[in-house]
Each structure stands twice: as structure tokens, then as C-alpha cells.
Amino acid sequence: MSQRDRILEATLALMARGGAHGTSMRAVAAACGINVATLYHYFPGKQDLLKAAIEHRRSSDFPASPFPEGLAGTVEGRLGALLDRVFVDMTVDEDLWRALMADAIHGDDDVLRPLLETADAFESALGDWLRTLCPDAPGLHDPAVVRAIRNAAIGVLVEHLPQSEGRREALERRALELAHVFARVAPDQGIARPADSSFEDPVHLPEPVEES
């Protein structure tokens, strides 16, 4: 492991314990056994260090394919297996994600921006996974559907990360529930869109009822 990677891993460990606020350049240097001047040689400041650490974790969380050998079975079954794998992988670093989300909720810009970038990277990776694992379900390839699945998956993680008992079983059930819902869009080829997609779908209000 390179010195840079050792610094990033130490930063992630400190962030998992104390969040962004509890992770100082001096603490990271001490954890790595280097002096602060050496740390500044790699990263000009704390914001650069935190961003690089989150990007470092992101690169390992979003592989080219979570199932290189592919998946068999129904679209719903494959989608359920994919979402379950996502939940399992994301909970490996539960302390880190819990701390990062808490910092983001409190408006810490050093964390919020990298987390938003992580959400975008997750959406991009999810789209690639769906096209690879479910080529026979073009409805799941629609960008709006991919984003909806991403948002639902993140919501499930936020809901269950604080859970201490029965979380694995709960996440497995939620993966199956989401797969059951989203697999229904597959036969319909996704969401129909108007020719000019720059406009939102019109909202049709009911006609007013005249009083007699």
C-alpha cells in the first residue's frame, strides 16, 4: 500500500470514529506515524484530504460489476440480488457512512459535496450494473428509473443504518420489496417521455364544479 493510500485509510478510520469535525490533520499525521509537514506535502488542506478519502472509499464501493459472472433468473430476482449486494457492501463501513451522513445533515460542506458526488457516482454505476445484469429489461435502463432506484436504496440505508438487531434480514426484505416494485416497469419499456424532455409533465387539474 502506498503512503498516500495509508493516509487515506487512516483518515477514513478517524472519520468513522469522530466524523469530519473530529478528524484533524494533526490526528491523521499521528495515526500514520508521519509529521504534519509530510501530510501537507500530499494534501494542501483538510478539505482536500477529506474529499480524497471519500473518493478513495467510493472507488472500492463501485466496482465495474458486483457480479462479474452474471446472474440468472427473473428480472425481479436479479434486481433483488443486486440491491441486496449493494446494501451488504454499503453496511461494511457503517460507522463511516453514519458519521458522514450526520456531518452532511449538519451542513458540513467538506463532507456534503463529496457525498453528493458519491450519490452521482452510485447512480452512474447502478445504471451500468442494470444494463449489464438486466439487458432484457430496458425499462430499468431509463435514467429516471435508475435515479428512482438510487434514491430508494439510499433511503433504505438511512433508515436501517441505526438499527442494531435484525438489520441484515430487514435489508434483505427491503431489497426484495424494491425489486418487486421496480421490476414492474420492465415490460413497459420505462417511463414514457414527451418529445421535448426539457418540460415537466403537465399537471391536469380537475374541472371546477359549478354551484347549482
Image (tube, rainbow, N blue to C red):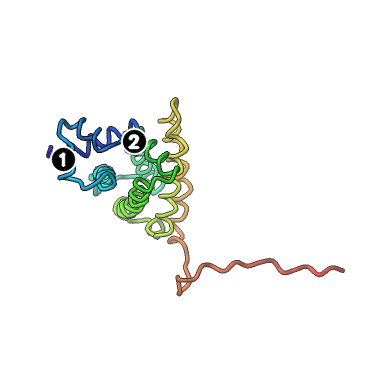
* Residue at far top of view: 165
Q: Disc 1 designates what residue?
A: 37
Crowd band around label 2 with a 10 angstrom C-alpha radius: few (<14), some (14–19), many (20+): many
Q: Is residue 103 left or right of residue 11?
A: right
* Residue at far front of view: 37
Q: Label 2 amino acid?
A: Leu
In three-dimensional space, the C-alpha distance between marks 1 and 2, rounded to whole angstroms, equals: 26 Å
Q: Disc 2 designates what residue?
A: 96
SS under mark 2 = helix
Res. 67 in view: no
Q: Nearer the viewer, residue 97 or 128?
A: 97
Label whose residue precedes the other's in the sequence (1 or 2):
1
Choose top left, top right, bottom left or bottom right for residue 156.
top left
Res. 193 in view: yes
Image coordinates of residue 160 in percent, x first then y, are: 45, 35
SS under mark 1 = helix
Q: Label 1 amino acid?
A: Ala
Crowd band around label 1 with a 10 angstrom C-alpha radius: few (<14), some (14–19), many (20+): few
Q: Residue at x 24, y 38 (%)?
A: 25
Give above or below for 60 relative to 137.
above
Q: Residue at x 43, y 30 (%)?
A: 167
Q: Residue at x 31, y 45 (%)?
A: 72
